[in-house]
Amino acid sequence: MDVVISAGKSKVVVPKLIGVQTVEDARRILSDKGLKLGPIIEVESDSDKGVVISSDPAAGTAVSAGTEVSLSISSGLKIVPQVVGLSEAQARTDLANLGFQIQILQQVVNEQIGSVLAQAPKPGTKSSEGALITITVGVPPGTTIVVPPTPTPTPTPSVTVTTSPSPSSTTTP
């Protein structure tokens, strides 16, 4: 008589998912390995929105085929850095590297010419990628202040309603 002992479900190794750009890409990678996508949690990070930050179980862990792997993905919120005191060029670079839009205001000063004097929102504030950060830069006396254009609101579509006079409202001579 031959006895066959089962080793149980086959084991697979959780693939490296950190840095994967989208949940759909992570789902495909897991599926190709015989794993399932589990719960997804958004966390704050310096990464772009939707990028995988970690997995549970972690990459390299041997698990049974069909195991769910939960993901932590970036919420896309970035912490606004301190740029007051930096040169305009350095502030622009730092903010642009984080994915922020930048608006420059000018203020006439005798000292700190070319430096950032103020910023909004304040450093440490959490803002979404693409958010507008306004910096005020010192310019020398006699400089013509350039006022940035005011953003034009997107026009709302309008509907023209025409009505015909009702028969009861017409008069006959």
Image (cartoon, rainbow, N blue to C red):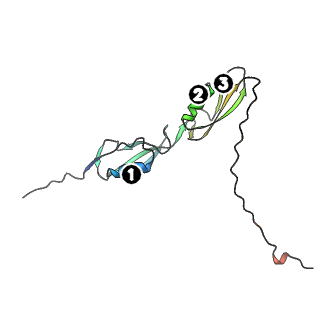
Which residue position holds label 2?
90
Picture coordinates of residue 31, whole percent (x, y): 35, 52
Residue named by callout 3 = 114
Q: Residue at x 70, y 48 (%)?
A: 153
To which residue does mark 1 refer? 28
Distance from Cα at disc 2 to Cα at disc 1:
40 Å
CA–CA distance in space, label 1 to label 3: 50 Å
Q: Amino acid at mark 2?
A: Gln
Marks 2/3 in contact by CB < 8 Å: the verdict is no
> Which residue occupies 67% across, 30% down?
136
Could you tell me which residue is drawn at 57 percent across and 40 percent down? 127
Q: Earlier in the sequence, mark 2 or mark 1?
A: 1
Whether residue 99 is visible here, answered yes or no, is yes
Quadrant (top left/top right/bottom left/bottom right) for the N terminus: bottom left
Residue 83 seen: no
Amino acid beneath label 1: Arg
Query: Please, is residue 89 above or below residue 151 in the view?
Result: above
Q: Is residue 160 left or right of residue 115?
A: right
Earlier along the polypeptide chain: callout 1 or callout 3? 1
* Residue 154 as seen in the image, left or right of residue 78: right
Label 3 secondary element: loop
Callout 2: SS:
helix
Q: Nearer the viewer, residue 52 or 123?
A: 52
In this orientation, which residue lies closer to the viewer: 80 or 149?
149
The quadrant the C terminus occupies is bottom right
Q: Position of residue 4 (x, y in %)?
A: 13, 55
Of labels 2 and 3, earlier in sequence is: 2
Residue 125 rendering spot, x and y as whole percentages = 58, 36
Q: Which of the 4 quarters of the picture holds residue 171?
A: bottom right
Q: Residue furthest left?
A: 1
